[in-house]
Image (tube, rainbow, N blue to C red):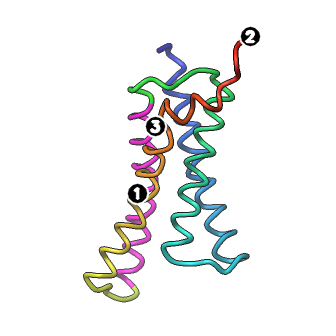
Amino acid sequence: MNGSAPLALRYYAGGAVLAVVALNLLVRALFKLGGVSATLLVATLVALGVSLIFARREKRLPTLTERWRLVGLYGLILGLLYLGLFGLMLLKDEPGHMGQLLFVLHALSYPTLLALCFTPRLIRHWLPQAG
């Protein structure tokens, strides 16, 4: 892995987070879809999009290190955003235990789906065919 590879992973993670925000606004406001279904739809679309873009731009499979770093960075950025959102929820009203659990499950669905989709098995299908 060369010196510019971690920088590229930051761009992938940052772009994915921006896509999460934009798609959530679109799906929830424009299409009036909410709850777990909206979260799973957005998380899946972003995960598949990151995998497709990586395959098309890099023209290779990600290494195990790249996979872990990208999922970790993506999860970290979204986790910090969700932590801020959770803080705002606490200021407004104390969510119950089930509300807190649901909130955590929503937050964990994004990195989990990226980890499931950002695999060589899936990316292999999107690589340009040689010959």
What residue is shown at x 49% (from left), y 29% (from top)? 120
Q: Amino acid at mark 1?
A: Leu
Q: CA distance from mark 3 to mark 1?
A: 15 Å
Q: Amino acid at mark 3?
A: Leu
Q: Residue 42 is drawn in which quadrant? A: bottom right
Q: Which residue carries the number 3 mark?
A: 70
Callouts 3 and 1 close, C-beta under 8 Å: no
Which residue is outermost to the left?
97
Magenta segment: does it hold 88? yes
Q: CA distance from mark 2 to mark 3?
A: 30 Å
Describe the element under mark 2 as helix, strand or loop: loop
Q: Residue 28 is drawn in which quadrant? A: bottom right
Callouts 2 and 3 close, C-beta under 8 Å: no
Which residue is outermost to the top?
131
Q: Which residues are magenta?
A: 67-91
Callouts 1 and 2 close, C-beta under 8 Å: no
The front one of 130 and 89 is 130
Q: CA distance from mark 1 to mark 2?
A: 45 Å
Q: Which mark is residue 131?
A: 2
Which residue is outermost to the bottom?
93
What residue is shown at x 74% (from left), y 10% (from top)? 131
Graded by Cα atoms within 10 Å as few (under 14), some (14 to 19) or many (20 or more), the crowding at tag 2 reads few
What residue is shown at x 41% (from left), y 51% (from top)? 112
Up-down: is 47 above or below 68? Answer: below
Q: Which residue carries the number 1 mark?
A: 80
Residue 121 placed where, x, y %? 50, 32
The front one of 10 and 20 is 20
Q: Residue 23 is drawn in which quadrant? A: bottom right
Q: Amino acid at mark 2?
A: Gly
